[in-house]
Amino acid sequence: MTDANESKLIERVARGDERAFLELYDRHASRVYGLTLRILGDPMLAEEVTQDTFLKLWSRARQYLAERGPFLPWLLTIARRVALDRLRLESRRPLLSDVNDPENVWHTVPDPGSTAEESRWRTLYFAVLSLHPDQRKVIELAYYQGMSQSEIAEVLNMPLGTVKTRLRAAMEKLREIWKEG
Amino acid sequence: MTRDEHAPFLENIPAYAIGALDADETAALASHLEGCASCRTELAEYRALGESLLTALPPRQPPAALRKRLQSRLLGAQKTKRLTFNWSFSQLATGIALVVLLAMSFYSITQMRSLQLEQARLNRQIRTGQTVMSMLSYPATERLAINSESVVGSLLLDRERNIVALIVWNMPQLDETKTYQIWLINPQDERVSAGIFRPEDDRVYTTYIVFPEQSVTDFVGVGVTIEPAGGSDQPTGERVFKVDF
Ligand SMILES: [Zn+2]
């Protein structure tokens, strides 16, 4: 969640304060890098996209509105979009069976954290992990590869109806757990 | 509006919220949303869930060099207008990609597919080449010799960025039923698969980049074996070479 301290940092970044920028970087770079690495499956590309994301933060910090929601999801939304654009530009979409198996990332057990934010993301982490692998795969492709349902159906060689049902069931289940957490 | 009238739209909302709804269905839902407050509420919840999903991934520490580079980019941006140029360049690149995609949509699906695959293959080759180049120029990269009865080459090891690159000369082409498989070897002498590959037809050398899931420092070596197509859980076939870190 965006604490008061963080809101101040963002305001300072919007005014061009480099030190505040680096402090935000230190707080969130590992989240941005974790996400972009997940999407791109390539450390070099992920590093470039992480850089682009933070440069966007530098030039667009004033567009962030604290009352609209917490900062980290806002930043990660930018990171996801930049990464998916990059994915398309590299036309890496058909290469799903690349070195990084989507399944593997969910087997890294997260460190036990103390803050409320950390406990919340761990809830979701385990929620995703608790999905049936077939459902998780569909969510993975949609969310981390930016595919539409019919693209997923094609890649998994599966009827479109099945993909729709799985995606919907997975999202409903996630929402349930997320609301409880 | 009755519940039944919402139903076809309601069921598309989760997909729409994470951008997975196909274009034809998206238009219909978007126009329904304009006039339907209850569906908008539903969408808002799934959007929020989608945002939270972004934060659900395990964090990974980026290389320390990135922070330094960003710092110098900021300094550069303040002194010159280079940053603006870079932005417009990336926009231009996206624009060109869009034009290319539009042009390609006139091709038949089959032609498009083979073009995409070819493009992807070339991109992969270029990226692999760039990775190798950048590793070679990186001061912390270690270069180890690959020297077995059948092949020679180099193994590049970048412990900081967690990358291993193999460059092997005269790797024999395999028939369709077989593949080369790479294994990372841990101190307990156990093998963890790090991917499968086939030599490129048009080259005398083969490059393959491994981005290990675990830290490469957890391993003491790399081996390559010949396995049935699709790869094996554990090495079963002939060893091609092995390199100790
Ligand atoms: Zn409605």
Image (cartoon, coloured by chain):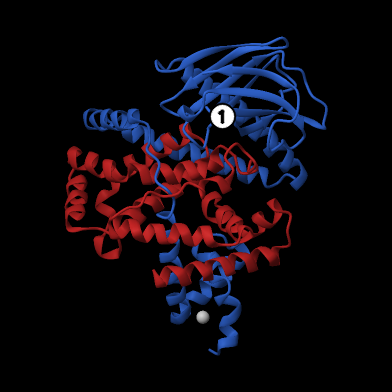
Mark 1 falls within which chain?
B
> Where does the image place residue B160, in percent across and percent down from the top left?
41, 26
Is residue B204 or residue A34 the one in the foreground?
A: A34
Query: How far from the left and from the top, in percent, is residue B95?
Result: 50, 41
Q: Colour of chain A?
A: red
* Quadrant placement of the C terminus of chain A: bottom left
Question: In screen coordinates, is B27 left or right of B49?
Answer: right
Taking the spot 42% from the left edge, 35% from the top edge, the residue there is A47
Q: Can residue B44 be seen in the rendering of this structure?
A: no
A51 to the left or right of B205 = left
Question: In terms of depth relative to the viewer, which is nearer, B121 or A125?
Answer: A125
x and y percentages locating residue A109 in the rendered image: 45, 49
The picture places residue B165, in percent across and down from the top left corner, at: 55, 22
Callout 1 secondary element = strand
Out of B112 and A46, give the one closest to the viewer. Answer: A46
**Which residue does the image show at 62% across and 29% down from the upper left?**
B183
The residue type indicated by label 1 comes to: Val
The tint chain B carries is: blue
Q: Is residue B35 above or below residue B89?
A: below
Q: Quarter of the image holding residue B99?
A: top right
